[in-house]
Image: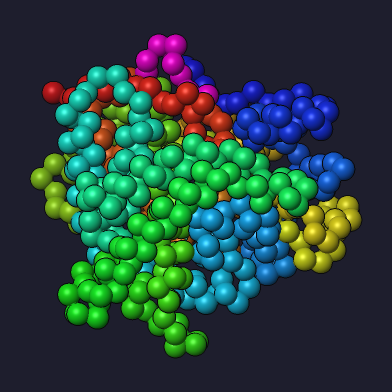
């Protein structure tokens, strides 16, 4: 049986110049193989030091025990500001805490139930789109379309076919294509002037996207005032007052948050869904089991959150895909005070990298780390690692706000698609994972898709 694709690591020693070149191409193949067995690795370059922390206790310290001492690096902010402004993804300290107090209630369990019918409608629309043109197709594009649709329907109660939604989506794709330089800028503390060299076109697309989002937000504010607003995520977030300050988001702040929901919510979910569909194609027996479970759970069912309880195996498949292909492969923090990690002194202001990609495939933690095995979640090793070495949504107070949302959406879309279609590999076109903003396939993911009889 073929193993799920994994990028070739680079040799353990390369020149800084070569490292930068590799990094620019993709941050996964730029890393040496030893990171899959190391607890920590230090990278020294003339510009900076960075520490990749790969030990559960260290990851806990950074993300859960003392997160305030490891804020997001300012460089990430510089790279992303044109599009994301002061959104919750890039802020730190008190500003960030206030933003989470307003946003988190919109994603609570109960709200997720209310959001579910919109996800269901998006999943049905995805099935109809694929059914309209079956055959060989690039599945990442389909997954992006579906995930963007989920976001617009749940946030603003509009489908992706809505003119503004479609314009945000297409502008965003153009923005993404120009992103690689920002990607490196975010991860590598290059000389200070470099990240600021946003290309003019990137600035322009960011401005266009923000203007479109500002329009949607303005319309919604008016509807809230008129008492005609639908009860969706946007209305919830825009009408929630911070229990501490009693304030709501200003319009400008809301534009920042919508931009990040769109970016964080559709790029990541699309990446996970596309890899999940490829994995089904690679493992026909798993595919048959998912399809059977989906048929039993969904045939004749209503758009009710309860169906997820009948999609247990599909959920384990999706979790396993998030382990092997975590859409956010690495997270970068900065230490605000000197630290000692594993008896090594870490200077204040170093880059602290937590890598779900490496942690999830760590050879000293996981049994057969590179194998796809959805059954592992029912084993002792799988259960233990789920607690201490599995962080596709990060962990601690800065955990992904959309984690529950993404698990509901991903499992539902996977089940609906597997119930309707058979997915097969296209010979000679197996994908190679690369990491830009999220983990993607170098030349897309090409699958042959046939309706099930
Ligand atoms: C499979 C899908 C998803 C994955 C794997 C994922 C993963 C992550 C990760 C790893 C982070 C932390 C990044 C860091 O600390 O540097 C994050 C943050 C975030 N995610 Fe997600 N995400 C997903 C879907 C979503 C969805 C659907 C939404 C919203 C609708 C969302 C909204 C956010 C937001 C707002 C943050 C920033 C939280 C903060 O910094 O306080 N994500 N996500």
| Residue 341, image x, y percentages | 82, 55
Q: Does residue 152 lie above or below 92 as drawn?
A: above
- Residue depicted at x 70% and y 63%: 70
Is residue 220 found left or right of 428 in the rendered image?
A: left
Q: How is the image coloured?
A: rainbow
Q: Does residue 6 lie above or below 264 as drawn?
A: above
Q: Main secondary structure of the magenta part?
A: loop
On the question of residue 39 being in view, the answer is yes
| Residue 416, image x, y percentages | 24, 39
State yes or no: residue 428 in magenta.
Answer: yes
State yes or no: residue 394 in magenta.
Answer: no
| Residue 154, image x, y percentages | 28, 58
Which of the pair 272/260 is nearer the observer?
Answer: 260
Q: Residue furthest top?
A: 427
Which of the pair 332/23 is nearer the observer?
Answer: 23
Number of numbered discs: 0
Report the span colored magenta.
Answer: 425-432
Q: Does residue 372 lie above or below 342 as drawn?
A: above
Is residue 121 found left or right of 435 in the rendered image?
A: left
On the question of residue 65 being in view, the answer is no
- Residue depicted at x 35% and y 74%: 238
| Residue 210, image x, y percentages | 42, 58
Q: Quadrant of residue 357?
A: top right
- Residue depicted at x 39% and y 59%: 211
Q: Residue furthest left?
A: 300
Which of the pair 9/160 is nearer the observer?
Answer: 160
- Residue depicted at x 67% and y 64%: 71
- Name the quarter where the C terminus is drawn: top left
Q: Quadrant of residue 273?
A: top left
């Amino acid at each position: 049986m073929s193993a799920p694709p994994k990028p070739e690591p680079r040799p353990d020693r390369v020149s800084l110049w070569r490292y930068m070149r590799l990094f620019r191409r993709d941050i996964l193949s730029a890393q040496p193989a030893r990171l899959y067995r190391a607890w920590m690795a230090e990278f020294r370059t003339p510009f900076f030091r960075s520490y990749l922390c790969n030990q559960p206790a260290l990851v806990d310290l950074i993300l859960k025990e003392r997160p305030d001492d490891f804020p997001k690096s300012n460089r990430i902010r510089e790279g992303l500001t044109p599009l994301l402004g002061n959104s919750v993804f890039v802020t730190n300290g008190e500003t960030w805490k206030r933003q989470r107090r307003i946003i988190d209630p919109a994603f609570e369990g109960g709200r997720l139930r209310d959001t579910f019918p919109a996800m269901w409608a998006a999943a049905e629309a995805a099935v109809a789109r694929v059914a309209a043109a079956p055959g060989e197709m690039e599945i990442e594009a389909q997954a992006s379309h579906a995930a963007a649709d989920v976001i617009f329907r749940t946030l603003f109660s509009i489908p992706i076919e809505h003119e503004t939604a479609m314009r945000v989506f297409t502008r965003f794709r153009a923005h993404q294509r120009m992103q690689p330089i920002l990607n490196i800028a975010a991860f590598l503390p290059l000389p200070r002037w470099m990240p600021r060299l946003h290309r003019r076109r990137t600035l322009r697309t960011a401005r266009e996207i923000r203007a479109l989002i500002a329009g949607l937000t303005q319309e919604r504010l008016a509807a809230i005032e008129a008492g005609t607003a639908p009860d969706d995520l946007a209305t919830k977030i825009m009408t929630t007052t911070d229990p501490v300050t009693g304030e709501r988001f200003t319009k400008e702040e809301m534009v920042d948050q919508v931009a990040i929901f769109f970016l964080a919510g559709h790029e990541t979910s699309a990446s996970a869904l596309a890899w999940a569909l490829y994995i089904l194609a690679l493992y026909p027996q798993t595919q048959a089991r998912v399809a059977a479970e989906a048929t039993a759970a969904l045939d004749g069912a209503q758009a009710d959150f309860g169906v997820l309880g009948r999609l247990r195996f599909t959920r384990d498949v999706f979790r396993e895909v998030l382990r092997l292909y975590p859409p956010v492969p690495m997270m970068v923090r900065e230490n605000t005070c000197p630290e000692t990690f594993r008896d090594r002194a870490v200077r204040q202001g170093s880059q602290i990298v937590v890598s779900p990609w490496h942690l999830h495939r760590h050879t000293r933690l996981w049994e057969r780390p590179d194998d796809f095995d959805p059954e592992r979640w029912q084993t002792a090793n799988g259960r233990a690692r789920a607690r201490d070495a599995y962080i596709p949504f990060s962990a601690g107070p800065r955990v992904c706000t959309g984690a529950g949302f993404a698990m509901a959406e991903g499992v539902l879309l996977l089940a609906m698609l597997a119930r309707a279609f058979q997915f097969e590999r296209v010979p000679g076109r197996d994908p190679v994972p690369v990491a830009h903003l999220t983990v993607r396939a170098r030349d897309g993911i090409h699958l042959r898709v046939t309706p099930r009889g």
